[in-house]
Amino acid sequence: MSDIDQARNAGQSPKSAASRGTSPHNANNVTTQITPALDAEELSEDDLSVRGESVASSSTSVTSSVLQYRTENGRTYHGYKDGKYLMPNDDRENERLDIQHNMFILTFDNQLGRAPVNAKDTSIKVGRVLDVGTGTGIWAMDFADEHPESEVLGVDLSPIQSTFVPPNVKFEIDDIEEPWTFSQPFDYIHSRLMTSSIGNWQEYIQKCFDNLNPNGYLELNEVDLYCKSDDGTLSDDAALNRFSKLWGEAAVMFGHAFQDNTTLKDLMADAGFVDINVKVFKWPSNPWPRDRKHKELGYWNLDNSVAGLEGFMLGALTRAHNWTKEEVTVFAMEVRNEMKNPRIHSYQTL
């Protein structure tokens, strides 16, 4: 996973809690924590491939027919602001998003985020909460259940959220790159995996600041585009890295480049946030690590990545790079094999 910025605003400034960290209004007060290097589990010949163990998802989302969707290469995509987001919005993708949500819960030790309001022993109460890019709405619904005193608004380009929601949850179709016209400010803004969906992060973070109450929190959770390995088992010319490069190029072509996560804390400070805390986590590509938690994260991440690989690739490679679906399918097999190989000790930072 990528760093976590969680920050707050003092006085006239809101707080921000980002899944990049919590740090004060000025960069000198930024605190950073980094997950240490992971030890790989020793393998026998019988362990050369990850066998197919899979973590079941608990998706409760249902697709909506409110808008006309685009159908392309057997997948459906949002109709509102057609073409702005490269990922599909069909049931397959929605189930993957709920798997991904569970990865965040595991990463944060059974909490919904790193902002202080999510701590199990917190006495903090929040009023209005905004979940940006809510997807299936699973985070918004879970938060609303844990905080019945709050009013949670989830916004997204696609109306794919469940119709069975807690009474304190509302979903709206909205483009967060347009001017924000919310009637009242928020106490907590939760923003997760919005990189390649935001064209101007400085402007986006400033909007968040301007729409938070004093002492409100912004939380940003972002994953780095490229996988890494500390022991050189992931080569520079690996299929995983070649795909990341192509995906990054496609995002640039569509005006929503992947953000360098190391810049987020400075952008938050520039916007006026204080108490910015940055924490870096690791998501292994498969269950290669020795320690129990990262091994479990590896299982989840492999499930998540394999389920989403076609969706990650199709829009980016066919629209931006003019590949055929057949070419994407062949390349996906190569990438998938690397994802499953426990001798490749790769991970993404969050």
Image: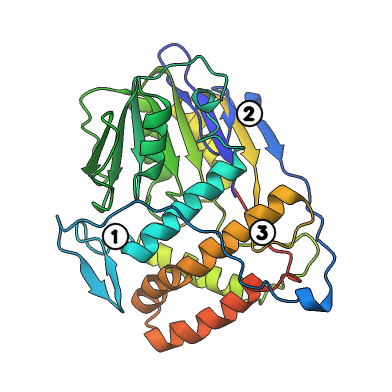
Query: Please, what is the three-letter code of the amino acid marked with disc 2?
Result: Val
Q: What element does badge 1 sit on?
A: loop
Classify 10 Å Cα crowding around label 3: few (below 14), some (14-19), many (20 and above).
Answer: many
Residue 224's label in the rendered image is none
Residue topped by disc 2: 30
| Residue appearing at x 43%, y 16% in the figure | 125
Q: CA distance from mark 2 to mark 3?
A: 25 Å
Classify 10 Å Cα crowding around label 1: few (below 14), some (14-19), many (20 and above).
Answer: some
Residue topped by disc 1: 84
| Residue appearing at x 55%, y 49% in the figure | 103
Query: Please, what is the three-letter code of the amino acid marked with disc 1?
Result: Lys
In this view, the residue in front, 181 or 340, is 340
Q: What element does badge 3 sit on?
A: strand
**N-term-proximal mark, 2 vs 3:** 2
Query: Please, what is the three-letter code of the amino acid marked with disc 3?
Result: Tyr
Residue 347's label in the rendered image is 3
Query: In the rendered view, would you say 32 is above or below 102?
Result: above
**N-term-proximal mark, 1 vs 2:** 2
- Tell me where residue 236 sits by quadrant: bottom right
Residue 199, x across and y down, in percent: 37, 51
Q: Is residue 339 left or right of residue 326?
A: right
Q: Is residue 345 left or right of residue 133?
A: right
**N-term-proximal mark, 1 vs 3:** 1
Q: What element does badge 2 sit on?
A: loop
Q: CA distance from mark 1 to mark 3?
A: 28 Å
